Image (spheres, rainbow, N blue to C red):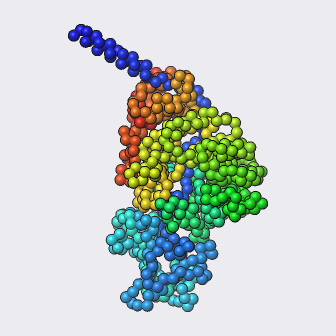
């Protein structure tokens, strides 16, 4: 018996010794190092997955101005309805419909719109209806029509009547109040009596919208606390051809007269075709600047460099890209945009900004030229932009592109040319596997500290889907955890990496083409993905200065499945440690803070799941969300046990 006790004691001693030997010893130097830019973590918006019309833009009517190539796409018409363009209300949106009596007292003439995958209406919400109308006949006297919201059961929920007595275009409004919540309601308009009427720009918006944007989606963005807001793309900046590229000047001024543009994503994916995907541009550059201001993010507009999408066009096709001697209008667009954002109200474009309701400048500090461009055609065009922007606006930072890949010949060439041109930031994109993100946490350790800084403008960890969607990437915990681990490397190298934005931002659950995406939504509500919470934890714990965090004199970037970074927040006077444990076992860690005597009490925020495939969905929004607890240090040392598959943020 004594022998067995002795053996047991020896075994326990050995296990304790193993535990001590296996324990990780992290050291933090509390002397503040390189500054962390206010733009370090942000968001990127592109109108993909019905992110604008049908998404962030709160307009509920599809094809509201009858300008889709199929003029009545999105509309069901009955009775006597025709499309016309004689003396229109808006010169850049010239089409409208004429609704005439059916010719029989028991028959109706009118039209219905089901919006974007239905119209989501909420109990207690009021909806602003507006329409431009006139009598069709010059000598007409009056006509009357009804507008109503109709439920999924085809029973009207609310309605109002509008009387038209003028043969000149006028705006008419009504307020519709819903006493029900339905995801698939629709709007119906029909002639009640009188003469033919012309109708145009038919709009329906919830009253809780913010400058035409969905209130819940705006809050989803604001709660990220982003420092930078890149818009409007992405590939739509380039267009499938130059004619359909995104042009900012078409997105300002009265929304009623902003011309329609084809969305570059309406036919790109054969397995997810949306031939009804167009851009009304009601959500335009003015609104993007307003949104940037509201959520506290620096705006970063991206403009065409004169190259159509290089994925979709041959570089040898002279008709696909603008010639160098025809590039000046594109450069003028960039110069004029800076004036629109920052110019005095006495300037042409500054006056337009003021007329739209914002006389004070938007304080634009940087601009991007080109999206995912590569090869020799790009730098020779970018050089012309750089010279003229530098000459007129020397304080504006210029962001160039390293192409669509994270490495390789074109990537290296792109960086070489960006250094030659002296741009301020180089946009890198990587949509890669979780394994890539884990292996590349040290990606920026050896980047040159001289020359352009890095902007990780589009990135996301792509985990292949499950079941019947094995090749379509998923927003699950595995992806989010690998991103959290990778981002410790961004933070540790904040002297090189000045900003980073996950992509894409939004996706409609019925209208997505690309995934994963940061925020998913239907017509009534949204859900924040697990990846959203990673971005939020970085955005709300950014700090102001990098702190050195080492183990055995080396950065913690994957050894034993651990990744870590540290920052100091001068304003809050807080030390912030971020640790990702991507391994299968819990990890015991001692963190010693050199330079201080007593760390005191703090907060621990963890994001954890035992299931790597776990996701947040509309039906289970809080499946994986952060949990907060109190922690206490002993002197200047914090001893922690971090569970397997966990992202932890400590703040003291």
Relative to 91, does residue 102 appear above or below in the rendering?
below
Q: Is residue 575 visible?
A: no
Kindly identify the residue that appears in the image at 46 percent across and 21 percent down. Answer: 635
Kindly identify the residue that appears in the image at 26 percent across and 12 percent down. Answer: 5
Relative to 365, does residue 436 appear above or below in the rendering?
above
In this rendering, the count of numbered labels is: 0
Kindly identify the residue that appears in the image at 66 percent across and 58 percent down. Answer: 314
Kindly identify the residue that appears in the image at 55 percent across and 43 percent down. Answer: 41
Quadrant assignment, res 289: bottom right
Which of the pair 567/247 is nearer the observer? 247
Residue 117 rendering spot, x and y as whole percentages: 43, 65
Relative to 501, does residue 121 appear above or below in the rendering?
below
Viewport quadrant of the N terminus:
top left
Q: Position of 639 compared to 493: left or right?
A: left
Which residue is outermost to the top?
2
Residue 546 rendering spot, x and y as whole percentages: 58, 33
Q: Is residue 452 visible?
A: yes
Which of the pair 353/591 is nearer the observer? 591
Relative to 574, does residue 86 appear above or below in the rendering?
below
Which residue is outermost to the left?
1
Q: Position of 91 compared to 185: left or right?
A: right
Residue 538 rendering spot, x and y as whole percentages: 51, 40
Quadrant assignment, res 184: bottom left
Residue 236 rendering spot, x and y as whole percentages: 59, 59
Quadrant assignment, res 468: bottom left
């Amino acid at each position: 018996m004594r022998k067995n006790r002795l053996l047991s004691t020896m075994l326990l001693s050995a296990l304790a010794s193993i535990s001590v030997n296996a324990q990780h010893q992290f050291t933090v130097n509390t002397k503040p190092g390189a500054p962390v830019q206010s733009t370090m973590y942000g968001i990127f918006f592109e109108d993909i997955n019905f992110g604008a019309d049908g998404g962030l833009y709160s307009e509920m009517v599809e094809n509201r101005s009858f300008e889709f190539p199929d003029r009545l796409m999105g509309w069901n018409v009955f009775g006597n309805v025709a499309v016309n363009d004689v003396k229109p209300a808006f010169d850049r949106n010239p089409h409208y419909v004429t609704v005439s009596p059916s010719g029989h007292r028991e028959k109706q003439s009118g039209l219905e719109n089901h919006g974007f995958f239905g119209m989501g209406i909420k109990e207690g919400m009021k909806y602003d209806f507006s329409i431009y109308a006139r009598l069709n006949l010059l000598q007409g006297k009056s006509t009357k029509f009804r507008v109503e919201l109709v439920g999924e059961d085809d029973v009207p929920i609310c309605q109002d009547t509008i009387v038209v007595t003028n043969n000149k275009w006028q705006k008419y409004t009504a307020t519709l109040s819903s006493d029900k919540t339905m995801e698939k309601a629709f709007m119906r308009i029909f002639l009640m009596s009188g003469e033919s009427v012309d109708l145009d720009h038919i709009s329906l918006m919830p009253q809780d919208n913010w400058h035409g944007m969905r209130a819940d989606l705006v809050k989803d963005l604001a709660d990220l606390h982003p420092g930078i807001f890149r818009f409007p793309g992405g590939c739509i900046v380039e267009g499938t051809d130059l004619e359909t590229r995104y042009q900012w000047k078409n997105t300002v001024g009265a929304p009623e007269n902003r011309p329609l543009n084809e969305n570059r994503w309406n036919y790109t994916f054969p397995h997810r075709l949306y031939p009804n995907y167009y851009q009304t541009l009601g959500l335009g550059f003015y609104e993007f600047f307003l949104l940037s201001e509201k959520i506290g993010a620096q705006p970063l507009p991206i403009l065409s460099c004169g190259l159509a999408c290089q994925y979709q066009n041959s570089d040898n096709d002279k008709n696909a890209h603008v010639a160098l001697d025809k590039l000046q209008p594109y450069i003028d667009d960039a110069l004029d945009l800076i004036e629109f954002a920052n110019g005095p109200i006495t300037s042409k474009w500054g006056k337009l900004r003021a007329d739209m309701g914002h006389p004070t400048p938007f304080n634009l500090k940087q601009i991007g030229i080109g999206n995912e461009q590569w090869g020799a055609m790009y730098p020779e065009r970018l050089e012309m932009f750089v010279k003229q922007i530098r000459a007129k606006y020397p304080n504006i930072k210029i962001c160039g592109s390293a192409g669509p890949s994270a490495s390789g010949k074109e990537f290296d060439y792109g960086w070489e040319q960006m250094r030659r041109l002296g741009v301020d930031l180089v946009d890198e994109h990587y949509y890669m596997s979780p394994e890539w993100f884990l292996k590349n946490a040290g990606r920026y350790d050896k980047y040159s500290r001289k020359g352009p800084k890095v902007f990780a403008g589009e990135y996301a960890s792509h985990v292949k889907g499950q079941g019947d969607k094995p090749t379509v990437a998923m927003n699950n915990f595995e992806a989010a955890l690998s991103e959290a681990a990778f981002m410790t490397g961004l933070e540790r190298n904040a002297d090189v990496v000045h900003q980073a934005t996950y992509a894409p931002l939004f996706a409609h659950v019925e209208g997505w083409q690309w995934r994963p995406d940061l925020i998913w939504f239907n017509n009534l509500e949204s859900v924040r993905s697990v990846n959203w919470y990673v971005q939020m934890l970085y955005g709300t714990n950014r700090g102001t200065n990098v702190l050195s965090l080492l183990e055995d004199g080396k950065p913690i970037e994957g050894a034993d499945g651990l990744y870590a970074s540290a920052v100091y927040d001068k304003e809050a006077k807080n030390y912030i440690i971020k640790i990702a444990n991507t391994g299968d076992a819990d990890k015991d860690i001692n963190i010693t803070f050199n330079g201080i005597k007593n760390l005191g009490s703090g907060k621990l925020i963890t994001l954890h799941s035992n299931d790597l495939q776990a996701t947040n969905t509309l039906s289970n929004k809080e499946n994986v969300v952060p949990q907060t607890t109190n922690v206490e240090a002993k002197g200047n040392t914090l001893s922690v046990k971090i569970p397997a598959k966990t992202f932890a943020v400590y703040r003291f």
